[in-house]
Image (cartoon, rainbow, N blue to C red):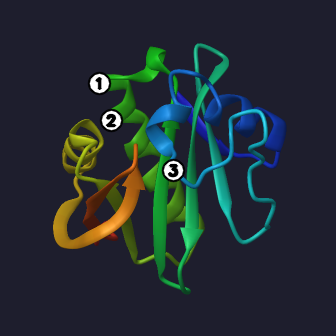
Amino acid sequence: MEVNRTFDYGLVRSIMTSPRVYPHIIDDFSPSAEEFRPIRDDRLIYLAVSDESEVRGAFLFVPENGVLFRVHHFLLPVLWGSKAIAAARLAMTWIWENTDCQRISGKTPTCNRLAWKFAEKVGMKTVGYEPNSVQIGGKLYAQIITGMNRPEAV
């Protein structure tokens, strides 16, 4: 398995809008999968995850400032489970080695317990709670804020 930076927005879009992925990454104000287009901005870092020579997922790192990056993940079912954890660790290692990032953070709606547990399994710690901050299916949910610092060994 490997991760590489990509500017292939069509590829990123195909992963993000997969019927097995898109319902888990949107809220009530997101466009339909047909209308969705990834944001094109050189400051954003899209990493493609390849497994068995095929791209099967992507990570998006959004710099909030020079040292704090927010992470989003989009993994096809073939990468779910232990491969997802390995992919996330590779993506985080890439960020630590190729940017000035000192902290990675994420937000997960409380209705997506699997994503929250995934964040914990890759080493992120729960650091906060944002009440009534996302609307899904007409209902307001809190978001759990997770984060981790750059390892000292990097």
89, above or below 53, in the image: below
Circles 1 and 2 in contact, beta carbons < 8 Å: yes
**Which one is closest to the eye, mark 2 or mark 3?**
3
Of the numbered discs 1 and 3, the one sitting upstream in the chain is: 3
In depth, the one of 144 and 9 nearer the eye is 144
Label 3 is placed on what type of residue? Asp
Residue located beneath label 3 in the image: 28
Q: Residue at x 78, y 47 (%)?
A: 37
154 left or right of 31 in image: left
- Rate crowding at label 2 as few (under 14), some (14 to 19) or many (20 or more) other CA atoms within 10 Å: some
Q: Position of residue 39 (x, y in %)?
A: 75, 58
Question: Is 106 displayed left or right of 76 in the figure?
Answer: left
Height in image: 76 above or below 25?
above
Which type of secondary structure does the marked residue at label 1 adopt? helix
User: Residue reaching furthest front?
Assistant: 138
Q: Between marks 1 and 3, how big is the CA–CA gap?
A: 30 Å
Residue at the disc numbered 1: 82
| Amino acid under disc 1 | Ser
Residue ID at (30%, 42%): 115
